[in-house]
Amino acid sequence: MSLLSYLAVAGAVVLAAAGFHYLVHRGLAPRRLVGTGTPAVLGLVYREVRIATANGLRLHGWFVPGTGAPPVPAVVLLHGWGGSAETLLPLAPSLSQAGFAVLLFDARCHGRSDEDSFASMPRFAEDLEHALDWLRQQAEVDPRRIAVVGHSVGGAAALLAASRRADVAAVVSIAAFSHPRDMMRRLLASQHIPYWPLGWYILRYVQHVIGHRFDAIAPLTTIRQIRCPTLLVHGADDRTVPVAEAHTIYAARGAAPVQLKIIPGSHDDYGDVAREAPLLAAFLRDSFASRQGDI
């Protein structure tokens, strides 16, 4: 083969790989949904905030102040893939009535937050950690009593963030998958993409792009590293993330203080989750009390 022919073949391979990678990025990118609701729709007083995160970007959020005498405990709510701060709004009234300040925010590439090169579960966790840092700086918030509540990818991110921080008072993870590999394999199968060789390559490529091995960030791994009270909540009729995955995470907890609650509903049925909001508030109240007296 002549040098010219070799360069032509090499160039074609490079272009094909670049095109394939572009399709992977595009196919896995979340849809950006910007809703019209705000906490005011639920009768909550709030202020709109912008929170600095990685890469010089900013997150859009709503901060609902606590109703008690400061400093008050606080809860951060993090939506799932393709969601926004509005997704978990149904939980806010019960948490506010319990006396907690509530922060809801959009992860990067979601809602009204800034766009980035890509979104990922570790970036959700990164954004969550910046939200926690922002809350700790608010004069009316007790920095020793801040909890996180996440849904789906946000739930897995909540477990990841809590596994590497000692200042999280409690975690509620709703409908989290047990391992990113299994979640992605289900997604690829739903798109009729064969695992070998395309799916196998996509999974390796995604790990390269996000800069993390799936095994290291999987809830199966992070659950064992959490030391604060943790509640796993999962819908019995979840078809996106089967309820068996919640049992798998729970079984992997080791010595971590983890509880499991199976509730009626599917993956995206927030009405059922909202009906369980008093249970979540009670769990958080008990967790906060263990940090600093009874609230």
Image (cartoon, grey):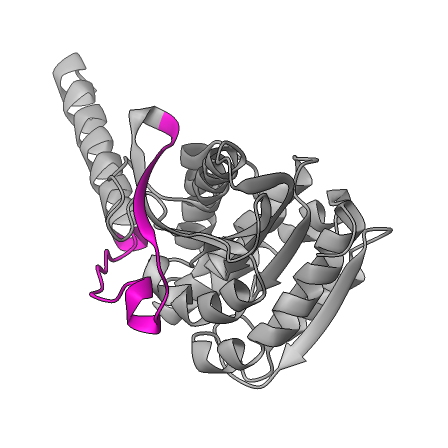
Task: Name which residue lies at 27% across and 44% down.
Answer: 113
Q: Is residue 143 left or right of residue 273?
A: right
**For this rendering, which residue is in front, 67 or 121?**
67
Residue furthest to the top in view is 3
As drawn, the residue found furthest toward the front would be: 69
- Label count reads 0
Residue 101 x, y percent position in the rendering? 50, 53
In the image, residue 32 lies in the stretch drawn in magenta:
yes
Vertical relation: 139 (above or below) 251: above
Q: Is residue 291 magenta?
A: no
Q: Is residue 174 above or below residue 76?
A: below
| 18 or 5, nearer to the observer | 18
Give the percent coordinates (x, y) of residue 195. Answer: 46, 58
Query: In which quarter of the view is residue 264 placed?
Result: bottom right
Residue 266 percent across, percent down from the top left: 49, 81
For residue 61, above or below residue 282: above
Residue 12 appears in which quarter of the rendering?
A: top left
Q: Residue at x 67, y 41 (%)?
A: 163
> Which residue is nearer to you in this view: 137 or 204?
137
Is 187 displayed left or right of 237 in the figure?
Answer: left
Q: Would you say residue 260 is visible in this rendering?
A: yes
Q: Give me the residue at 12% from left, 16% from top.
A: 4
The answer to whether any part of residue 216 appears in the image is: no
How far across and down, in percent of the image, does residue 145 sit? 65, 45
Give the residues drawn in magenta, as a range: 27-54
For image coordinates 14% across by 24% down, the residue present is 8
Q: Is residue 220 left or right of residue 269?
A: right
Q: In which quadrant of the rendered image does the C terminus lie?
A: bottom right
Quarter of the image that includes the N terminus: top left
